[in-house]
Amino acid sequence: MAKDRNNKQYSKEFKESILKRIADNESVPKLSEELGISKSTLYQWARNEKKTQGDVPDNKPSTKWSSEDKFHVVLETASLSEVELAAYCRRKGIYVDDVKSWKQQCLKANTTVSKNPQKIDEELKAEKKKAKDLEKDLKRKEKALAEAAALLVLRKKAQANLGGPRGRMISSSDRKVAVELIDDARASGARLKPACEELNISERTYQRWTAGISDDIKEDQRPLATRPTPKNKLSEEERDEVVAVVNKPEFADLVPSQIVPKLADQGKYIASESTIYRVLKEEKMNTHRNRSKPPIRRPIPTHIAIAPNQVWTWDITWLPGPVKGQYFKLYLIVDIYSRKIVAHEVWETENAQYAEYLVKKAVLAEGIAGKPLVLHSDNGSPMKAATFLATLEKLGVQSSFSRPRVCNDNPFSESLFKTLKYRHKYPTKGFSELSESRKWVLKFVNWYNYDHLHSGINFVTPNQRHNGLDKAIMEKRIATYEAAKRKHPERWSGSIRDWSVQKQVTLNPVREKEFEEQVR
């Protein structure tokens, strides 16, 4: 006797008749309505019947099931609900995903349609074209790789600057070396134009050097050229007269700037002041002989910072006091890499002891005692005091100073002072007392370090850059802009905004020409 969930008993003959109707593809829900038997009971009878007949194996790994077994599983589970399917899979020792994948395989089994021969031919042509394009791309990349390797070798061999600005005179030996290096690079796969650019010469210059039947390199003909004498050039008699006049007893101790007016008073003109200076220089008679020191060409103080706490600049500015003529002195140190104010104090006077205290405070606060650090300043008395310089030496800090009478050698501190004094809440009428100025400056420093998006560091706060947070911020900004460009590409005529991180900051950067003059 068979039982349902309500423990109601049915005869074996009744159950077999029901199973036969199910086998004849009668709907299980309709049978359930007609007979008053739950659908789950009818499905259970059908599964038990198939189990006894051995249609679908139990407790067998899904990887070892035959195609026929999988097909039977798909048929059995076709009308099951999610809950019934889960129970069925647990009994069979398989997963729900296995049944779903088997069902998809069954559905796709009969979808294969014989392709049109013409379509197959078109696809074959497309594949051949694709393979040809890939082969071309591969050859192009191989050439580019060979060229890059050749240029790297050329760059390594070319230690000297064989090129230079337009019109520069290059010796024959340097020309020969340059041509040999370029020929070697071209033989290794480099093109002419990139090879010439590595040596800082133009493609046309190389062609001019190597033009001709012989293998000899053409020499520069400018030194051998015969040029006409300038019309305004002094004759030898006039030069001799200039030398004779300036060496007269009455002019012997005078400079040309004094000689020219005296000659004009006498109604004489032999040459201009600059011409007299030039003639004396050529005759080596313009040696400095005054009691004053000869002019000294001082090098530009330049330093490069690639991380925080490598180069600091500091200065003192005056804050207006309660009465006209009275000022409070703001001492301030700024890191040029991050633009962060690392230390500040306000006092009533300028004193080297205050400067010593400020530097010690900054070094200890940043935890860089004993580490290499450059501290740049102008030439004020607190900056050059002997006790202050001794303190810097003890702390391992290298001092750097602006050139005398040069107002823009300390730009980071000067720019910061302008930002401070142009704040809309800056008390232009003065601070009533020292404590008030200190409170205001402290509030400004907190705003500047933690809230102000600095344009010089691509609009992050100095504190973010000082602590290395700017890289993640820039990556997020780049992702945001790239997503916006993908969404509306028609609104972007070129690349996205430059949100790159500034890798280095230079104090007073010099041009290549200025650097060469300093080295000389």
Image: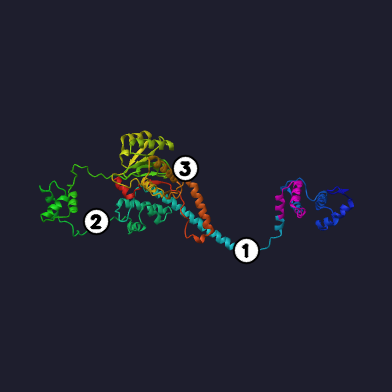
Task: Let me know if residue 513 appears in the view.
Answer: yes
Q: Nearer the viewer, mark 3 or mark 2?
A: 3
Evaluate whether residue 377 shows in this view: no
Q: Earlier in the sequence, mark 3 or mark 1?
A: 1
Q: Position of residue 132 (x, y in %)?
A: 54, 60
Q: Which residue is mark 1?
A: 120
Q: Main secondary structure of the magenta part?
A: helix
Q: Earlier in the sequence, mark 3 or mark 2?
A: 2
- The stretch in magenta equals 74-103
Q: Residue at x 55, y 60 (%)?
A: 130
- Crowdedness of circle 3 by 10 Å Cα count: few (<14), some, many (20+)? few
Query: Residue placed at 48% from the left, 54% from the top?
Result: 142
Q: CA distance from mark 2 to mark 1?
A: 75 Å
Q: Residues within 10 Å of mark 1 (few under 14, many from 20)?
A: few
> Horizontal and vertical percent for residue 351?
33, 37
Tell me the amino acid under the disc marked 1: Ile
Amino acid on which the number 2 mark rests in the picture: Leu
Q: With respect to residue 344, does 32 lie above or below? A: below
Front residue of 86/161: it is: 86
- Mark 3 secondary-structure assignment: loop
Of tags 3 and 1, the one toward the viewer is: 3
Q: Earlier in the sequence, mark 2 or mark 1?
A: 1
Rendering coords of residue 61 (x, y %): 73, 46
Q: Secondary structure at mark 1?
A: helix
Question: Could you tell me how far apart the alpha carbons at marks 3 and 2 are, in whole angstroms?
Answer: 62 Å
Q: Amino acid at mark 3?
A: Asn
Residue at the spot of label 2: 224
Q: Nearer the viewer, residue 320 or 373?
A: 320
Quadrant location of the C terminus in the rendered image: top left
Circle 2 sits in a helix, a strand or a loop, which is it? helix
Q: Which residue is mark 3?
A: 467
Q: CA distance from mark 3 to mark 1?
A: 62 Å
